[in-house]
């Protein structure tokens, strides 16, 4: 049975700027009008970097304002709106099971820019839209600028909507600027997504945004390094704030004037940010070519006269107030979100081939089709890669099924968590040559993907193997994500060459990021950065009394957890014995040694006394409120668990060549007061002093307090949402007719 909706929005939901903001407003307006809508996500060709879904659109899906549409879902819609022509310029890489009465392509961008360069192939756009949805589209320009850019000869049988499809805005979300006089200094501001073409030329910028710091402050939302690259130097009176999706209304309320000029090579289709400034009642100063769009709501002048215009309004407070009121009134009457339902009814009556029908019947929304997400990880020394993937997998929605493939013996953790798992032995285990092993690995991964038909392939490792990349080449439509941690050694830089084998690279956050100057640092702007990832949130841990009861630990014991890794690549026996012996010198101390689930000698290890216990716990972090202190390796997972869990810890980094730079994490903790560092090759003679500090109640309290002050959200949630959003999208980011 088909899902029946009034409107299906088709959009690249990753767009940062006005296209997504305008779409979010329309979705809300449709919901308030009682219209049932759905959102089909498209990965178009304009954005190459791993942008996440725009948060406004994400919230609307989460809160039920619109339905997430899977391309395989049969949907019958009164209207389909394709937002932005470029997303359909290439043919979709899969069939779309959506039919409709009216098909609109909302043209958010001119066909030609200011330099008369064509921005997209309109004939291809129309043809691919018709093929995808089985109906000839109608073009809906967002403004007269876009309308005038269309050629006189349109593609055959293509029509253009007689009325424009301008951006709408809900003025309730844009409170009026406080009625106050212009301050001193005068605050001129602007905001836009970070793009140098959104800014005036080097010759004009000093006239548009005066450099007199005593008289003017220039406040910028959406600043970045690109401004210094464009202008050489940035004036001292610029207050530069990074691009943000939230808090824009508050930012605008701090301004006296809004001045927006852009590069001569740029052609602004509409100007969503301008509409927002008008909505809060600012005096908006623009170049003359914007006048057909905003009429008397704004003031127009050339760059050389901007300061003269501003002075005119400063000298006449009544005129200043009048202009702000005129701006607000214009938005309310011409661009108010309440106009949306009337617009839809008018267009449907005009274009629908059948008589107007009632709103879509209210029926239960069928569940989304089940999709597999294949998590693959390399061998690793511990359980870190699998644990990180488990953190992501547990946060996926129910209709996305995690499947694991790993070279690590920690696969058992995935099986015990109830997931389907496949073991792919590393060539060291098989005693095979790398070439032969990669041949076999390519076949295994190929067969696994062909059988599972996953929507997303998520690879977690530092090393990327040729066998994996060869298999992935056979599935161009599969969305491939590489999750790679920071703090690489230079010897690992060879793996950066495989970045192009993936559609996106995600880098989990690192508390010690200031200490990371490795080979991945130069590529940080090309990846999706998320907060540090933990398998469990600190709040998910057992209560102290429950954890101690489960571990049979007396309430008055001073418990030191010891977790120095699997020992798979370095014999930690001497370090382990020395540190445990030092702890046991204190009569109230109890050592709880937590052995790695993959440690070969876990069952045969000997205790060093009756106050020394050896246990196997996974995940051990669940019990960590029972610990008063810890001695731990500084691997990614263990380090962030100890610090974010507020556990006073002596870090003993594993400094083997194949490991990440654990010593930098531990050094960060030592220097910032979030833990202590002991290097096994240099500091072992200082063990008594380190243990004395570790067991000092005042020292522990200071460390715990500093750790608790760290603001943090689990990056696993963000990665899970990213995978979810890309598991149900349609790809048009390449021409599928070409190899």
Image (tube, rainbow, N blue to C red):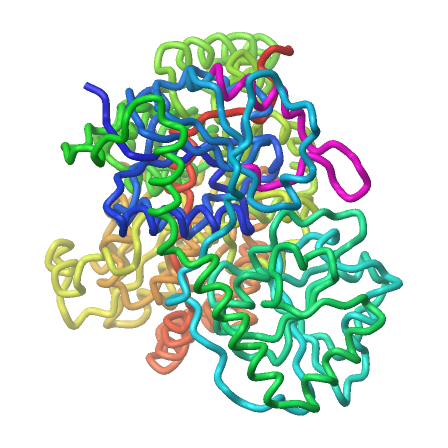
Which of the pair 104/31 is nearer the observer? Answer: 104
Q: Quadrant of the C terminus?
A: top right
Residue 292 coordinates in the image, percent (x, y): 65, 55
Left or right for 245, reference 236: left
Q: In which image quadrant can residue 696 be found?
A: bottom left
Q: Quadrant of the N terminus?
A: top left
Name above or below for residue 174 compared with residue 113.
below
Q: Residue at x 46, y 14 (%)?
A: 445
Provide the residue span drawn in magenta.
107-131
Which of the pair 684/22 is nearer the observer? Answer: 22
Magenta stretch: includes residue 130: yes
Q: Residue at x 89, y 63 (%)?
A: 203
Residue 226 coordinates in the image, percent (x, y): 74, 56
Q: Residue at x 38, y 65 (%)?
A: 582
Q: Is residue 357 visible?
A: yes
Q: Is residue 717 visible?
A: no
Residue 732 coordinates in the image, percent (x, y): 54, 24
Magenta stretch: includes residue 513: no
Left or right for 607, reference 383: left
């Amino acid at each position: 049975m088909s899902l029946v909706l009034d409107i299906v929005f088709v959009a690249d939901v990753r767009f940062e700027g006005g296209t997504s903001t305008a779409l979010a407003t329309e979705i809300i307006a449709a919901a308030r009008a009682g219209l049932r809508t759905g959102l089909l996500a498209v990965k178009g060709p304009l954005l190459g970097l791993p942008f996440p879904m725009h948060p406004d659109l994400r919230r609307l899906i989460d809160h039920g304002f619109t339905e997430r549409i899977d391309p395989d879902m049969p949907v019958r819609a009164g209207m389909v709106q394709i937002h932005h022509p470029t997303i359909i310029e290439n043919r979709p890489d899969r069939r779309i099971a959506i039919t409709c009465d009216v098909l609109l392509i909302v043209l958010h961008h001119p066909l030609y820019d200011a330099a008369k360069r064509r921005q997209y192939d309109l004939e291809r756009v129309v043809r691919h839209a018709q093929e995808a949805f089985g109906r000839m589209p109608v073009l809906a320009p967002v403004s007269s600028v876009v309308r005038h850019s269309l050629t006189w000869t349109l593609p055959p049988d293509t029509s253009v909507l007689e009325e424009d499809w301008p951006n709408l805005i809900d003025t309730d979300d844009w409170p009026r600027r406080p009625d106050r006089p212009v301050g001193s200094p005068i605050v001129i501001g602007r905001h836009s997504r970070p793009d140098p073409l959104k800014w005036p030329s080097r010759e004009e910028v000093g006239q548009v945004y005066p450099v007199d710091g005593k008289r003017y402050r220039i406040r910028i939302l959406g600043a970045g390094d690109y401004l210094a690259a464009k202008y050489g130097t940035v004036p001292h009176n610029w207050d530069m704030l990074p691009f943000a999706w939230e808090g824009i209304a508050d930012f605008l309320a701090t301004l006296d004037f809004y001045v927006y000029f852009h590069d001569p090579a740029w052609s602004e289709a509409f100007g969503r940010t301008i509409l927002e400034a008008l909505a809060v009642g600012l005096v908006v100063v623009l170049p003359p070519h914007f006048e057909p769009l905003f009429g008397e709501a704004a003031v127009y002048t050339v760059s050389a006269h901007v300061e003269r215009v501003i002075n005119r309004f400063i000298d006449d407070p009544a005129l200043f107030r009048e202009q702000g009121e005129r701006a607000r009134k214009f938005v309310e009457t011409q661009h108010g979100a309440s106009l949306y339902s009337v617009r839809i009814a008018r267009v449907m009556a005009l274009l629908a081939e059948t008589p107007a029908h009632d709103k879509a019947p209210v029926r239960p929304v069928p569940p989304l089709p089940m999709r597999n997400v294949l998590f693959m990880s390399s061998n690793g020394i511990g359980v870190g890669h699998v644990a990180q993937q488990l953190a992501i997998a547990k946060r996926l929605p129910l209709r996305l099924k995690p499947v694991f493939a790993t070279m690590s013996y920690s696969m058992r953790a995935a099986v015990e968590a109830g997931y389907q798992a496949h073991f792919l032995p590393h060539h060291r285990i098989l005693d095979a040559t790398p070439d032969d092993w990669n041949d076999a690995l390519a076949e295994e991964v190929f067969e696994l993907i062909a059988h599972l038909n996953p929507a997303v392939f998520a690879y977690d490792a530092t090393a990327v193997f040729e066998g994996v990349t060869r298999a992935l080449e056979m599935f161009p439509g599969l969305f491939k994500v590489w999750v790679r941690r920071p703090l690489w050694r230079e010897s690992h830089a060879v793996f950066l060459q495989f970045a192009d084998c993936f559609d996106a690279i995600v880098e989990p956050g690192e508390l010690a990021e200031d200490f990371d100057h490795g080979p991945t640092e130069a590529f940080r702007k090309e990846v999706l950065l998320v907060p540090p990832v933990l398998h469990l949130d600190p709040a998910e841990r057992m209560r102290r009394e429950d954890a101690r009861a489960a571990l049979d630990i007396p309430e008055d014991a001073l418990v030191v957890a010891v977790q120095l890794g699997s020992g798979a690549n370095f014999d930690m026996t001497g370090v382990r014995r020395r540190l445990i012996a030092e702890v046991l010198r204190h009569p109230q101390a109890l050592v709880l040694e937590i052995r790695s689930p993959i440690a070969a000698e876990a069952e045969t290890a000997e205790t060093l006394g009756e106050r020394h216990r050896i246990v196997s716990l996974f995940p051990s972090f669940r019990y960590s409120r029972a610990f008063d202190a810890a001695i731990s390796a500084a691997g990614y997972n263990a380090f962030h668990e100890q610090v974010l869990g507020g556990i006073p810890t002596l870090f003993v980094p594993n400094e083997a060549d194949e490991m990440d730079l654990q010593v930098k994490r531990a050094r960060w903790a030592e220097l910032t007061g979030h833990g202590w560092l002991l290097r096994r090759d240099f500091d072992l003679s200082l063990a008594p002093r380190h243990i004395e500090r570790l067991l000092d109640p005042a020292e522990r309290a200071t460390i715990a307090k500093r750790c608790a002050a760290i603001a943090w959200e689990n990056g696993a949630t963000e990665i899970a949402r990213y995978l979810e959003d890309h598991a149900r999208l349609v790809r048009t980011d390449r021409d599928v007719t070409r190899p």
